[in-house]
Amino acid sequence: MTFEARAVNPRSKNKWRIEIEGLDAALAFKVNIPEVEVVPKTHQAPGLSHPTSYAGDLKYGDIELEKVMPADEADEWAWDWFKQAIDPNTHEHGSPSDYKKDLIIWHLKEDGSNLEGWRVKGAFVLKLGYDDQESEDASAKILEKVTLRPDSYDKI
């Protein structure tokens, strides 16, 4: 049996592309798009022995991006975005109009073209987790996990 060695582009391992306000910000190996659910409301009319349920508000979970590689021009995008919500040095809170951003998360095909996407509204960085620097490529800047809290999202 013969095997042929091929050069592997590290970006080809990433199956997701993140655009923040129209600009490519990062690639990710894995993205968790959480469930969206209807929070039911109930009403019990006078004289009835049981409540009636109806659709209430929508509830969106946190979006998790894993093994995130920033675009070349956006080296510190996640940290800069995180600091817009609250500065770790001064503990000053930013304005939601500055730190809440709209983005598109694209699931990519093998050839790098878009397969499907989600339009995310009013997201901000909730958590950052940096890698342990055990990457095979020491120059690769990879975030282990970025957790975003969205106001809402919908499938494109």
Image: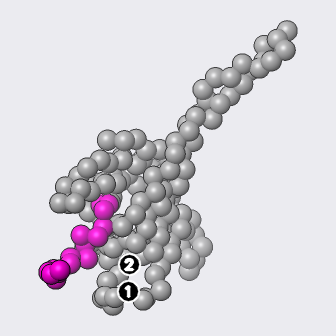
Tell me if label 2 and label 1 are in contact, CB under 8 Å: yes
Q: Earlier in the sequence, mark 2 or mark 1?
A: 1
Q: Secondary structure at mark 2?
A: loop
Residue 90, image x, y percentages: 57, 77
Query: Residue at label 2?
Result: 142
Q: Residues within 10 Å of mark 1 (few under 14, many from 20)?
A: few
**Foreground of the two, 99 or 132:** 132
CA–CA distance between discs 2 and 1?
A: 8 Å
**Foreground of the two, 98 or 115:** 115
Q: Can residue 135 be seen?
A: yes
Seen in the picture, residue 106 relative to 42 is either above or below; the reply is below
Instruction: Give the magenta range.
Output: 1-17
Seen in the picture, residue 84 relative to 135 is either above or below; the reply is above
Picture colour scheme: one colour
**Foreground of the two, 154 or 81:** 154
Residue 61, image x, y percentages: 55, 50
Q: Quadrant of the N terminus?
A: bottom left
Secondary structure predominantly adopted by residues drawn in magenta: loop
| Residue drawn at 32 percent across, 73 percent down | 70
**Which residue type does callout 1 highlight?**
Ser
Residue 31, image x, y percentages: 41, 60
Disc 2 vs disc 1: which is toward the camera? 1
Q: Quadrant of the C terminus?
A: top left
Q: Can residue 99 be seen?
A: no
Query: Residue at label 1?
Result: 135
Q: Is residue 35 magenta?
A: no
**Which residue type does callout 2 highlight?**
Ile
| In the displayed structure image, the side of residue 123 where residue 4 appears, left or right | left
